[in-house]
Amino acid sequence: MAIIESDIDASEIRSGKLQFAALFHALADPARLLILDHLRTGEHKVRELTEHLGLAQSTVSAHLSCLKDTGLVHVRSQGRASLYSLGQGEALDALTAAASALLPQEASHHHWEEAHSMDPKKG
């Protein structure tokens, strides 16, 4: 059997894996998923997102920065305000559908919920 040589450098492979990790990290937080869902309705300012989601402005800004770094969210300036919108909506829909297919069909409690509660009273 012949060994196929590749021009792909190990650092390129690591870089690609890091991009995957950054994307999945961005999707791993329930608050960021809520932000993405809310942005499906159109552009929003940080203030609007904080009001709708009940989160602190600094928290929403940090989440938007994470989402923007992966291209899941786009930002544009309008005067002194920044308007955030969903980026790559169709690709996100496809990824969500694929993730849904990977989930168990039976509803079962997952211990992740206990450790990562979005309820401020619990953590």
Image: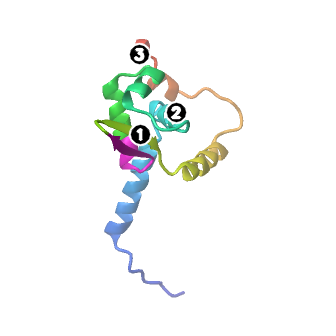
Q: Position of residue 37 (x, y in %)?
A: 54, 35
Q: Residue at x 37, y 35 (%)?
A: 63
Q: Residue at x 33, y 42 (%)?
A: 77
**What range is drawn magenta here?**
66-78
Q: Secondary structure at mark 2?
A: helix
Residue for badge 3: 120
**In the rendered image, is residue 117 in sight?**
no
Q: Tell me the mark number nearer the camera, choosing from 3 and 1.
A: 1
Q: Position of residue 111 (x, y in %)?
A: 52, 27
Q: Residue at x 33, y 33 (%)?
A: 61
> Disc 1 residue type?
Tyr
Q: Position of residue 102 (x, y in %)?
A: 63, 46
Q: Residues within 10 Å of mark 2 (few under 14, many from 20)?
A: some
Residue for badge 1: 84
Q: How many marks?
A: 3
Q: Residues within 10 Å of mark 3 (few under 14, many from 20)?
A: few
> Foreground: 27 or 43?
43
> Foreground: 114 or 79?
79
Residue for badge 2: 38
> Foreground: 79 or 27?
79
